Amino acid sequence: MRFIKTFGPIGLAAAWLMTGMASAQVTLKMATLAPEGSIWMQALHDAKTEIEAATGGAVKLKIYPGGIMGSEKDVLFKIKTGQLQGGGFMGYAIGKICPDASALMFPMAFRNYDEVDLALEKMRPFLDENARKNGFETVGWTEVGFSYAYGMKPIASLENLRATKVWGLDSPMLMDLFAAGGISSIPANVTDVLTSLQTGSLETVFGPPTAAVAVQWHTKVRCYNTMRLTYSIGGVFFSSPGWAMLPAPHREAVRAAFDKHCRLLTPKVRKSDIEALDYMRTQGVAPIEETPEVRAAFEQIAAVALQKVKGAVFSAEAWNLLQQVLKEIRGA
């Protein structure tokens, strides 16, 4: 009775409400293709730890790594049906969640990391809004990396490339580039590429260096061209209904943690790619230096391919914004 008299009925109600809020717990389930032990998965674990500490355990994360929940297409379906609330994506899903992000991944769009960093920073609000219109909240962007061409035969020019057996990978924009350049390609699942290199049914393949070493392609190719063909980005997203599950006071803590660890991940990805290229060279994979003439030739066929892609894969608004940003960066 003394406690009730001192605290009063309003105080008791407030205390009960606060106790209820403190005990309330939200668990967000997310999936990724990134394998356990990878730098991408470590970044997600670091964000999870920080979020659970910052919210006093009010927000929990359950992360399914290594494709446990299926392909990115499968994960998007499970998000749509409410089985999952989000994911860390690096491929197919980016084009569905944020189609305009594909403008940054168009072949030959970037020349170096400085251009990538400045363009992504300037375009973040535009891309975040694009994702939001498609029913997703962006909490972090990160790097997948630049892709290079690796070959069993010299690939110093367009003519060289046309004369080899080229992998027709699942990258529609790169396939459009090849079509514009008169480059024939042979389709193959990524899991079959190493065997195809071993048998000689494929001679030229593409991908980020870290991935090329991880899947052992470097053991079969003899050279790579230093020209950066395409750039790829990844990100962490939650569905709008999933994001709405979070109590408003905790949303910024969740966003800040993912954004922080995605940003910290990018230099790790770059370091890994540099180390992978260095390792390839020690294994006898010879670099073929990019020349201004070869870059100009690829940029020319990219301009042809762009006419098919712009307005279909990504909006003209996204491309024009990117070109405006690059013009400012290059001072052209």
Image (tube, rainbow, N blue to C red):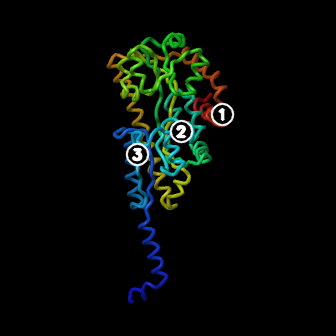
Percent across and percent down for residue 188 are 47, 23
Image height of 233 relative to 26, above or below: above
Which residue is label 2 attached to? Answer: 94
Identify which amino acid the numbered label 2 is placed on: Ile
Which residue is label 1 attached to? Answer: 320
Identify which amino acid the numbered label 1 is placed on: Asn
Percent across and percent down for residue 122 are 57, 40
Tell me, yes or no, whether the two marked residues, 3 and 1, touch with CB atoms within 8 Å: no
Q: How crowded is mark 3: few (under 14 residues within 10 Å), some or many (20 or more)?
A: many
Dividing the picture into quadrants, the one containing residue 68 is: top left
Identify which amino acid the numbered label 3 is placed on: Tyr
Residue 110 appears in view:
yes
* The C terminus, quarter of image: top right
Percent across and percent down for residue 40 are 40, 40
Which residue is label 3 attached to? Answer: 64
Task: Point out the tag, 3 or 1, that comes first from the N-terminus.
Answer: 3
Image height of 95 relative to 220, above or below: below
Dividing the picture into quadrants, the one containing residue 3 is: bottom left
Q: Residues within 10 Å of mark 1 (few under 14, many from 20)?
A: few
Image height of 7 relative to 303, above or below: below
Is label 3 or label 1 in front?
3
